[in-house]
Amino acid sequence: MLGRLMIGKIPEDATSRDVIDLLSQIPLPGDPGSLIMNGIEWIKAAISELQRTGCAESFYVEGFVKEAYSSAKKWESSNRSKGPKKVNYTRSRTFP
């Protein structure tokens, strides 16, 4: 793992099981009839659903994807001996 980008926190009235159930409803790229063509499209759909349910903060998803890709390239070329990077994308909360 190169790093993690935090995009929100699970609301107090939700559980990790709720998030799993939500994400499992998004069809995978290889599923029959799925309109999602690749992993990046799946991630964008997942973020949109997490935003809709209050598990991710509101931001422009396309901008996030570009910044995530840029961060991954930078992290890949940097010294990884310190372990995975942790970054708050929304900058409104601290990373645990």
Image: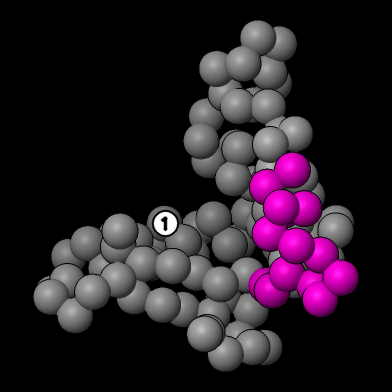
Judge whether residue 12 is colored magenta: yes
Q: Tell me, yes or no, whether the highlighted magenta stretch contains residue 59.
A: no
Element at label 1: helix
- Residue at 52% across / 85% down in the picture? 96
The part of the image, by quadrant, that contains residue 58 is bottom right
Residue 73: give x, y in percent of width and height.
29, 60
Q: Residue at x 68, y 36 (%)?
A: 24
- Identify residue type, mark 1: Tyr
Residue at x-position 55% and y-position 17%: 30
Q: Is residue 39 visible?
A: yes
Residue 38 percent location from the top left of the image: 52, 29
**Which stretch is magenta?**
8-21
Q: Indicate the position of residue 32 as horizontal and vertical percent values.
A: 65, 9
- From this view, report whether residue 45 is shown above or below residue 74: above
The residue at which mark 1 appears reads as 69
- Judge by depth and name the residue closer to the eye, 6 or 69: 6
